[in-house]
Image (spheres, helix red, strand yellow):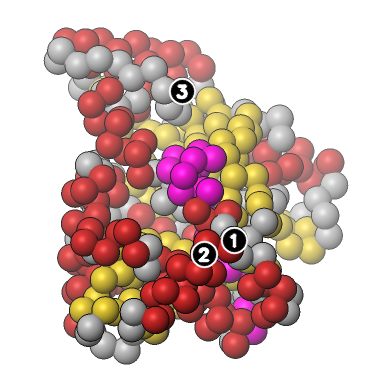
């Protein structure tokens, strides 16, 4: 098994996987390490008839003076990649054996990864820990005719898009550097309004690097009312797939729901450029909630969203969980019983609430 840890190695390896998404790229993983003690790793298995790759962040942690290492994924939808023929049982067995060895050599106690809802390759992880379905996501099939895509829209979405246009609200791909500054301000205000934790707040440098990445294309679309930016979204494009990454709306315009015009504009843009899928994502924390229902109004094509959880060393894992519980109780905080994985990284109940409300945006 090859383990890629620098950009050149990573990019060469990804050439074997023509259907990778931007969540699998080196540039996005580097952005995912900002501000913490983690390093991007791409684990690549080469079989006789297929190749398997799994990107992870190997991160260092500290509990009660004790250091440890575990593996996690970037925010979004990474997960395993497969190229060539469908993996045989022998390939899957060998891949799992080799990644066990590599993670053990790195001292990893547990591993977690969000999985890609469209590139459904979770079978290569079957038997190595557990995969758990957490909710659903929505996508628009851009291979279907424009008429068929519009037909799938919910009637109130169609009416609201028409109302927005009648009120003079416009939406377009941004070509102005100042728009990014406006979007960052909108995004910061949206996170403040939602009570989001620091996990979901990003520096200006993060947004600038996202737009400047060489491994994928990131596009900023903005909606304007009387020349004022009232809504915006960042959308990636990579190997035929458009992903809705981050979005924000001016609080005074929430009732107008300009995101409906935003999504419709991106759909038409993607259609004109030959993209195959526009993935809108899911609900808060990937739940089947109001946000999911809103996105469901654009398409009835849904995908299961799952995560992978694996405990590599049960004894040390249990010790770390006990230390974390002790740490929280000694500081007077409540241990949040949320099914968080790994359990020793469970946030306090106060911190968890803000993150839960916006995760899976």
User: N-terminal of the two: label 1 or label 3?
Assistant: 1
Question: Rounded to the nearest whole Å, what is the CA distance between mark 1 and mark 3?
Answer: 34 Å
Q: Residue at x 22, y 84 (%)?
A: 227
Where disc 2 sits, the SS reads: helix
Residue 60 visible to the viewer: no
Q: Residue at x 30, y 59 (%)?
A: 254
Magenta stretch: includes residue 348: no
Pointer 1 and pointer 3: residues touching (CB < 8 Å)?
no
Percent of width and height locating residue 320: 36, 18
Where disc 3 sits, the SS reads: loop
Percent of width and height locating residue 241: 59, 70
Magenta stretch: includes residue 278: yes
The boundaries of the magenta stretch are 274-293
Q: Is residue 315 above or below residue 14?
A: above
Pick the front one: 13 or 75: 75
Pointer 1 and pointer 2: residues touching (CB < 8 Å)?
yes
Percent of width and height locating residue 59: 36, 41
Mark 3 surroundings within 10 Å by alpha-carbon count, few (fewer than 14), some (14 through 19), many (20 or more): few
Task: Check residue 157 in the rendering and tell me which mark sits there, or answer none.
Answer: 2
Pick the front one: 67 or 202: 202
- Residue highlighted by disc 1: 154
Q: Residue at x 33, y 19 (%)?
A: 336
Residue farthest to the left? 331
Question: Rounded to the nearest whole Å, what is the CA distance between mark 2 and mark 3?
Answer: 35 Å
């Amino acid at each position: 098994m090859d383990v890629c840890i620098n950009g050149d190695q990573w990019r060469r390896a990804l050439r074997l996987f023509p259907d990778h998404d931007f969540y699998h790229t080196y540039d996005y993983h580097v952005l995912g390490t900002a501000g913490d003690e983690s390093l991007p790793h791409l684990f690549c298995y080469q079989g006789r008839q297929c190749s398997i790759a799994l990107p992870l962040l190997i991160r260092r942690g500290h509990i009660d003076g004790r250091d440890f290492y575990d593996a996690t994924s970037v925010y979004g939808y990474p997960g395993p990649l497969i190229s060539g023929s469908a993996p045989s049982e022998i390939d899957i067995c060998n891949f799992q054996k080799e990644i066990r060895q590599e993670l053990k050599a790195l001292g990893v106690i547990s591993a977690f990864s969000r999985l890609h809802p469209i590139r459904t390759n979770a079978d290569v992880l079957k038997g190595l820990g557990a995969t758990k379905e957490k909710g659903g996501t929505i996508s628009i099939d851009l291979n279907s005719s424009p008429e068929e895509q519009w037909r799938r829209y919910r009637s109130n979405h169609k009416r609201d898009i028409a109302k927005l246009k009648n009120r003079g609200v416009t939406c377009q791909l941004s070509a102005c550097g100042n728009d990014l500054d406006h979007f960052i301000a909108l995004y910061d205000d949206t996170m403040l309004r939602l009570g989001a934790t620091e996990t979901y707040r990003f520096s200006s440098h993060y947004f600038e690097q996202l737009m400047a990445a060489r491994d994928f294309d990131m596009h900023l679309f903005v909606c304007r009312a009387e020349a004022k930016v009232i809504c915006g979204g960042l959308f990636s494009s990579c190997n035929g797939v458009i992903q809705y990454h981050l979005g924000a709306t001016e609080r005074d315009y929430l009732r107008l729901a300009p995101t409906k015009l935003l999504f419709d504009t991106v759909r038409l843009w993607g259609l004109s450029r030959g993209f195959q899928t526009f993935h809108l994502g899911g609900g808060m924390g990937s739940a089947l909630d109001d946000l999911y229902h809103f996105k469901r109004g654009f398409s009835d094509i849904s995908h299961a969203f799952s995560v992978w959880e694996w405990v590599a060393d049960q004894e040390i894992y249990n010790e770390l969980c006990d230390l974390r519980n002790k740490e929280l109780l000694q500081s007077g905080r409540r241990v949040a019983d949320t099914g968080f994985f790994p359990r020793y990284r469970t946030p306090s109940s106060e911190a968890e609430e803000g993150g839960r409300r916006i995760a899976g945006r």
